[in-house]
Amino acid sequence: MSQTDPQPRQTRSDWDRRAARALRVEMARRDVKCGDLAKLLAARGCKASAQSLRSKMSRGTFSASFFLQALDAMGCQQVELGSLGAGTEKATQGGPRTAAELSG
C-alpha cells in the first residue's frame, strides 16, 4: 500500500456487514432461504427460527462459530472473500466463484 492510496479504516460494524454479506451470498448461491437454514441447523442441534436468522443477518451480529455452523450446514466448503466489500456483484447459484467472476 502506497502513501498516495491509503485504505480507509474499517470499523467493527463494517466487518459485521461483510460477515453477514458472506453468509447471504453463500445462501443465495445454494438457493437456501432462512427457513431452510433453520431446518438445516436444527438437524445439527442448533435451534434458531427463520425470524431469528433474518434478524442476525440484518444486524450482522453473529459469532464466528455460528457463521461456520451455517456454512457447514449448507455444505459450503469454500468462501470467496475478495469482493465482499464492493457490494456491487449479485450472488448466483453454483459453486465457488473467483473474484474475477464475481466482479465481471
Image (spheres, grey):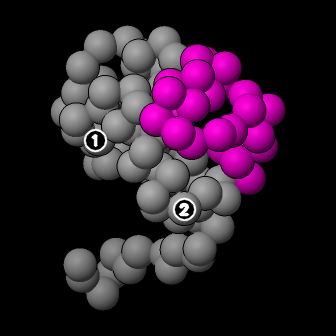
Residue shown at the point (73%, 28%) measured from the top left: 50
Residue mark closest to the camera, 2 vs 1: 2
Q: Magenta segment, which residues?
A: 33-59
Callout 2: helix, strand or loop? loop
Q: Is residue 39 visible?
A: yes
Q: Which residue is mark 1?
A: 80
Callout 1: few (<14), some (14-19), or many (20+) C-alpha neighbours within 10 Å? Answer: some
Left or right placement of residue 24 versus residue 78 in this view:
right
Q: Which mark is residue 63?
A: 2
Q: Is residue 40 magenta?
A: yes
Location of residue 23 in the rendering, given as x and y in whole percent from the top left corner = 49, 39
Q: Earlier in the sequence, mark 2 or mark 1?
A: 2
Residue shown at the point (30%, 87%) measured from the top left: 3
Residue shown at the point (66%, 20%) measured from the top left: 35
- Residue 92, compared with residue 12, is above or below; it is above
Q: Is residue 87 visible?
A: no
The three-letter amino acid code for the residue at tag 1 is: Glu
Q: What is the spatial separation of the Cα atoms under label 2 and label 1, in whole angstroms?
A: 19 Å
Location of residue 31 in the rendering, given as x and y in whole percent from the top left corner = 48, 12
Callout 1: helix, strand or loop? loop
Q: Is residue 34 magenta?
A: yes
Q: Nearer the viewer, residue 83 or 5?
A: 83
Location of residue 81 in the rendering, given as x and y in whole percent from the top left corner = 32, 48
The three-letter amino acid code for the residue at tag 2 is: Ser
- Residue 85, compared with residue 44, is above or below; it is below
